[in-house]
Amino acid sequence: MYIHRLITNSILKASKSFPAILVTGPRQSGKTTLLRKISPPGMNFVTLDDLIIRNLAQDDPKLFFQRFQPPLFIDEIQYAPNLLPYIKLLIDERATRLKPAHGLFWLSGSQNFTLMDNVSESLAGRVAIMNLLGFSLFEYISKDETVECKPFFSNKKKPQSSNVHIKELFKYILRGTCPKVLVDKKIDPVQFYSSYFQTYVERDIRGEIGAKSLRVFETFMRLLAARSAQLLNMASLAVEVGVSLNTVKSWLSLLEKTFQIFILKPYHTNMNKREVKTPKIYFMDTGLLAYLTQWRDPVTALSGPMAGALFENWVVVELIKSYWHRAQEAPFYFYRTRDGLEVDLFCVEADKIFAAEIKMSTTPKTNIFRAIQDSKIDKTIKERWLFSQVESSIPFDTKTVVFPASGIF
């Protein structure tokens, strides 16, 4: 069963303007399935998961492109980044002959640590880059393939209600968002994410951290998961894991580059200060987060000490998908005062700021935005949103809307 992805229109549009498109994202997010489904008639396909073809691509790129000619979809391009300069030559050669060069190459791959550098160097101005994560709840349950292509805060046509009960939502949160585990109900999510994690460590991380550090890295991942949706004290984490602060920073960078986590930085009018203050961490797949923190049963998790963090993590990532799956950056930050008062999320679009709080409660308090109320920054806020477990959208005051979290799209 194929499920429509919101990023589809953006890919097809970009393919009419750019010679190449690159769809990146974590393993098992559905990149290959999506691109094969929507690729135009006559487009050839090759995957570098095939070791024989991979060796050909690495050892003899010229022969590779004699055998596989554009228009061409190359899957798992990170295994042969040396193909990128040849792709550039083929694109430029087509342009010198005044032939249409758009849509010549579709590329997909899990982010690796040299791929983007090679893409930036070889295909600058020639490639549209987009990120695909696992299913959003809207993608998974909606049959609407014509939804307006704007991200959440920019979209004026928002659904007014949602009928996803909190218990059902937690089943979804714990099961995770990888298409394979969602579509096939026979798959045990614990076994799936155990295998996913080991594959990720062995294939994506091992070469970067060394075999001796794999067990320590697993401990690091579990301790990091326990800090999801919280301020991250990297020095404290380093002590608990038994590694240096620089190692923690390096490992966080690896996780971010491979789409396992999202690092949410604090908002400040000075851009430089956003880089140095304490960030918050969110896991891109709540299934992996649940696996690492050992929450298996939705009912137990719903009443457990991490319920609020799991819920907040899921909401933030749903909002990220609303932007990424429409081929836009997610301009997100959080806001914290010197007194420790906090707003969970700021979305900064040009000169507009949207403030959001995330609470599981169905009865919001009147002072939910006290961190910014009556302050200078509140005057720059266009709208305030409270994502909670209400069933329908409710105006809270002239500037605030209480919105069902499961209605994010």
Image (cartoon, rainbow, N blue to C red):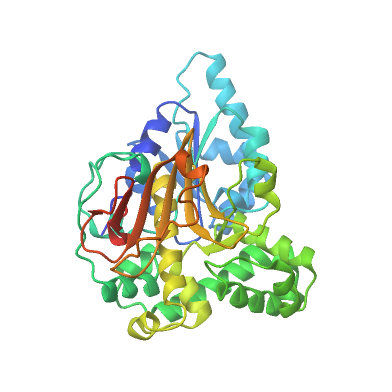
Residue visible at 72% across and 66% down in the picture = 248
Q: Is residue 305 above or below residue 383?
A: below
Frontmost residue, 134 versus 71: 134
Q: Is residue 65 above or below residue 286?
A: above
Frontmost residue, 310 versus 195: 310
Residue 188, can we see it? yes
Pick out the residue farthest to the front.
Answer: 374
Q: Is residue 36 above or below residue 188?
A: above
Residue 30, can we see it? no
**Residue 133: image location, x then y, percent:** 44, 55
Total numbered circles: 0
**Residue 250: image location, x then y, percent:** 73, 61
User: As drawn, is 208 to the left or to the right of 348?
Assistant: right
Residue visible at 40% across and 77% down in the picture = 189
**Residue 387: image location, x then y, percent:** 35, 59
Frontmost residue, 224 versus 123: 224
Q: Is residue 220 above or below residue 387?
A: below
**Residue 4: image location, x then y, percent:** 28, 50
Frontmost residue, 288 versus 198: 288
User: As drawn, is 356 to the left or to the right of 227?
Assistant: left
Quarter occupied by the N terminus: bottom left
The quadrant where residue 263 appears: bottom right
The quadrant where residue 137 appears: bottom left
